Image: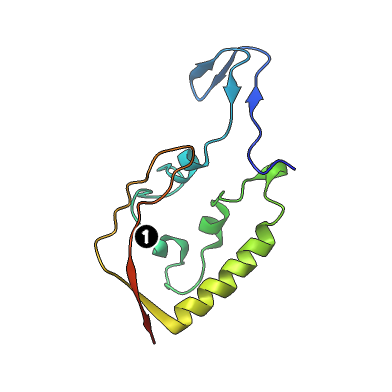
């Protein structure tokens, strides 16, 4: 089973978003580009977890959550998305209810570039509540 996005090549010359794409050019979706698009997320390069909350600061914003494509989209969406979201909710919820996470140094959001983007190493102090 393929666990990554399918690569495609067009059978004829195309223009996508004003850019000329010659026939037989390999293309694939770039989730990084979607998640960093100003048209999708305001100030996408800033760490702002509150962007996923409604104005009351407590309720999840369904509109913003639906814009997340971390698990893919359409026919190629991750088959384990529902399980992954449920597990993330349980694990992270339990951790956040029982601990406070304090940075030990300023957070550097510049990614390490490679086959995949990865965050720079960082440390934090975990304090029981």
Residue 119: where, in percent of width, then height? 39, 51
Residue 74: where, in percent of width, then height? 68, 43
| Residue at the (64%, 45%) spot, across then down | 73
How crowded pointer 1 is (Cα within 10 Å; few <14, some 14-19, many 20+) is rated as few
Colour pattern of the rendering: rainbow
Vertical position of residue 78 compared to residue 28: above or below: below
| Residue at the (48%, 77%) spot, across then down | 95
| Residue at the (43%, 38%) spot, across then down | 114
Vertical position of residue 74 compared to residue 19: above or below: below
Vertical position of residue 50 compared to residue 38: above or below: below
Q: How many marks?
A: 1
State which quarter of the image contains the N terminus.
Answer: top right
Quadrant assignment, res 65: bottom right
In the figure, is residue 1 to the left or right of 122? right
Q: Secondary structure at mark 1?
A: loop
Residue toward you, 5 or 113: 113
In the figure, is residue 76 to the left or right of 118? right
State which quarter of the image contains the C terminus.
Answer: bottom left
Residue 98: where, in percent of width, then height? 45, 84
Q: Residue furthest left?
A: 105
| Residue at the (59%, 74%) spot, across then down | 90
Residue toward you, 126 or 88: 126
Residue toward you, 55 or 93: 93
Q: Residue furthest right?
A: 1
In the figure, is residue 88 to the left or right of 75? left
Quadrant assignment, res 10: top right
Residue 14: where, in percent of width, then height? 59, 16
Label 1, on which residue? 48
């Amino acid at each position: 089973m393929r666990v990554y996005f399918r690569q495609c090549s067009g059978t004829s010359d195309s223009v996508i978003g004003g850019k000329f794409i010659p026939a037989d050019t390999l293309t694939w979706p770039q989730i990084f580009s979607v998640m960093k698009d100003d048209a999708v997320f305001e100030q996408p390069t800033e760490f702002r977890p509150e962007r996923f909350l409604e104005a009351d600061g407590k309720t999840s914003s369904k509109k913003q959550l639906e814009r997340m494509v971390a698990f893919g989209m359409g026919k190629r969406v991750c088959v384990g998305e529902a399980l992954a979201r449920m597990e993330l909710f349980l694990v992270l919820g339990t951790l956040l209810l029982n601990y406070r996470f304090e940075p030990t140094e300023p957070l550097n959001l510049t990614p390490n570039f490679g086959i995949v983007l990865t965050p720079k190493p960082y440390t934090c102090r975990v304090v029981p509540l």
